[in-house]
């Protein structure tokens, strides 16, 4: 990858890029409240499953599809929205995608429409000529990292333990990136029902700090 | 509106397997729905018990006695304008161990015209160790039409000591309203299903699950009412004002039924088909 591309990608997927992912937990807040996630080991297992068979896997496939030149962006956006089983997660994908697209349009002058977040990132990387493999790798690590950051605020977990969880998930991010790069929409699918239920039940959590 | 064409699927090459197709259409006149078309071929039959309300109730029966690799079943159902159709199955459907080769395929295409109401309420699918099942449910709704959909799934009958150590399931739902994609979901299970469902993000030890969708004008407004009925290992959300989704996990099929029967009766506003009570 060229140095300039590497820095563009790093900027897009940095927590400092103004998309606002820090206000979302993708149901993790409810999972902590219900005792499903309570320490470093259970957090690592929860995130590993999201990568291997949950919403991050579907996101990775959608991103890879959107990055291809022949992609039908309207159809992929509709599909990404329809795949989301909970209202807050739909709102999250829409909000992050719109914010990402607005900033990326303004700064890089790309012809990038608003789209659910993974579709917007995939399309932007395709337009900018970034190689999809590294985009997927970094997207998955950023998505996982955002949840680790949420966990630090939700339960007694130290910074070092959080960093250890993220490092332990690196092979999972790499394996999924490789799988997703060659996948298409026929390969979408998940089985993390308890995580879906946590996303649904987050809507009725009494006192909360995250919007999903 | 025309009924989707049913093409009898070709059986797998390796062994002569069960193939079946059924299509049904119902039409409304004077507030009562009646049969407009009924065709059945091969290992799939449609039984029409005596009606108990304004809807036509149709019961699917797989005469081959369980699904296995290479089987191919296809159902097409149409509720014409303002008509009401309730579809269910005669008994729990068994997905047996499949030999290497193609999975068992089940396809259902449901169409509800303007103002029609269509309920897809099959009884449980029992997944056996070694099962390989590829199932697709496509639902097309016209303006003002409604659909109540439920697929209960048992991952090995715990009371019989069954453990699903290896299976492949792809269970896909595609729901459209006036051609626009409203909901798409693929439940994808591979490998050691029992170990996977022991994981916290998947099932937390559950061996039974159900996915329920109510697509109807204003369905989302019922979220609070429905949540109040749900056990802890279940959730409901309305990602669209006209769509209410519910997911349930349960320790076994018995516990699942205990939660599911009152839920489906509340959502449909009517008792479940009698075959559910046998």
Image (cartoon, rainbow, N blue to C red):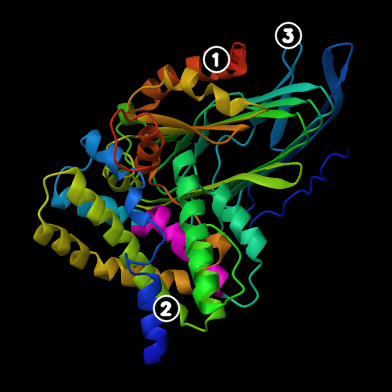
- Mark in front: 2 vs 3: 2
* Residue at mark 3: B53
Name the image quarter holding residue B216: top right
At which x and y percent is residue B157?
Answer: 37, 31
Is A113 covered by the magenta stretch?
no
Q: Is residue A136 above or below residue B76?
A: below
Given residues B237 and A7, the one toward you in this image is: A7
Name the image quarter holding residue A47: bottom left
Residues at marks 2 and 3, common chain? Answer: no
At which x and y percent is residue B248?
Answer: 42, 30
Characterize the local packing of mark 2: few (<14), some (14-19) or many (20 or more) Cα atoms within 10 angstroms. some
* Residue at mark 2: A133
Asked if residue B91 shows in the view, the reply is yes
Q: Is B55 positioned to the left or the right of B170 in the image?
A: right
Quadrant in the picture for the N terminus of chain B: top right
Which chain is mark 3 on? Answer: B
x 56%, y 58%: residue: B102
Query: Magenta segment range?
Result: A51-67
Q: Is A167 positioned to the left or the right of A97 in the image?
A: left
Q: Which residue lies furthest to the top in this view?
A: B52
Q: Is A94 positioned to the left or the right of B129 in the image?
A: right
* Residue at mark 1: B266
Say what secondary structure mark 2 lies in: helix
């Amino acid at each position: 990858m060229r140095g300039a591309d590497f820095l563009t990608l790093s900027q897009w997927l940095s927590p400092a890029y103004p998309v606002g992912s820090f206000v979302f937990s993708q149901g993790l807040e409810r999972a902590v409240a219900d005792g499903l996630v309570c320490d470093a080991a259970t957090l690592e297992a929860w995130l590993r499953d999201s990568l291997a068979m949950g919403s991050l896997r579907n996101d990775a496939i959608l991103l890879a599809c959107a990055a291809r030149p022949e992609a039908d962006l309207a159809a992929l956006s509709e599909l990404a929205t329809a795949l989301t089983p909970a209202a807050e997660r739909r709102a999250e994908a829409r909000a992050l995608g719109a914010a990402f697209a607005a900033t990326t349009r303004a700064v890089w002058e790309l012809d990038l429409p608003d789209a659910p977040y993974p579709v917007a990132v995939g399309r932007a990387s395709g337009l900018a000529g970034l190689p999809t493999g590294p985009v997927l790798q970094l997207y998955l690590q950023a998505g996982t990292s955002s949840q680790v950051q949420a966990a630090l605020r939700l339960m007694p977990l130290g910074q070092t333990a959080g960093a250890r969880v993220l490092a332990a998930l690196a092979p999972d991010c790499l394996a999924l990136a490789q799988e997703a790069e060659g996948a298409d929409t026929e390969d979408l699918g998940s089985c993390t029902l308890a995580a879906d239920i946590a996303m649904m039940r987050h809507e009725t959590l009494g006192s909360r700090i995250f919007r999903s | 509106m025309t009924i989707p064409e049913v093409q009898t699927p070709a059986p797998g090459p390796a062994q002569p397997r069960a193939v079946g197709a059924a299509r049904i259409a119902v039409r409304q006149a004077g507030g009562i729905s009646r049969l407009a078309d009924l065709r059945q071929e091969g290992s799939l039959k449609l039984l029409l018990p005596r009606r108990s309300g304004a809807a036509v109730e149709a019961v699917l029966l797989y005469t081959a006695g369980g699904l296995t690799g290479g089987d191919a079943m296809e159902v097409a159902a149409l509720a014409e304008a303002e008509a009401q159709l309730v579809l269910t199955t005669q008994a729990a459907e068994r997905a047996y161990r499949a030999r290497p080769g193609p999975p068992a395929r089940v396809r259902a295409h449901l169409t509800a015209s303007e103002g029609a109401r269509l309920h897809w309420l099959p009884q449980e699918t029992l997944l056996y160790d070694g099962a390989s099942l590829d199932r697709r449910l496509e639902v097309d709704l016209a303006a003002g039409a409604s659909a109540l959909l439920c697929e209960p799934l048992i991952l090995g009958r715990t009371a019989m000591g069954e453990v699903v150590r290896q299976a492949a399931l792809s269970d896909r739902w595609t729901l459209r309203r006036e051609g626009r994609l409203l909901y798409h979901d693929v439940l994808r299970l591979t490998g050691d299903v029992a170990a996977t469902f022991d994981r916290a993000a998947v099932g937390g030890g559950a061996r039974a699950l159900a996915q329920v969708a109510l697509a109807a004008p204003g369905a989302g407004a019922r979220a609070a009412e429905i949540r109040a009925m749900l056990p802890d290992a279940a959730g409901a959300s309305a990602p669209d004002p006209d769509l209410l989704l519910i997911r349930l996990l349960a320790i076994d099929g018995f516990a699942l039924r205990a939660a599911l029967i009152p839920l489906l009766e509340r959502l449909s506003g009517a008792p479940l088909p009698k075959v559910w009570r046998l």
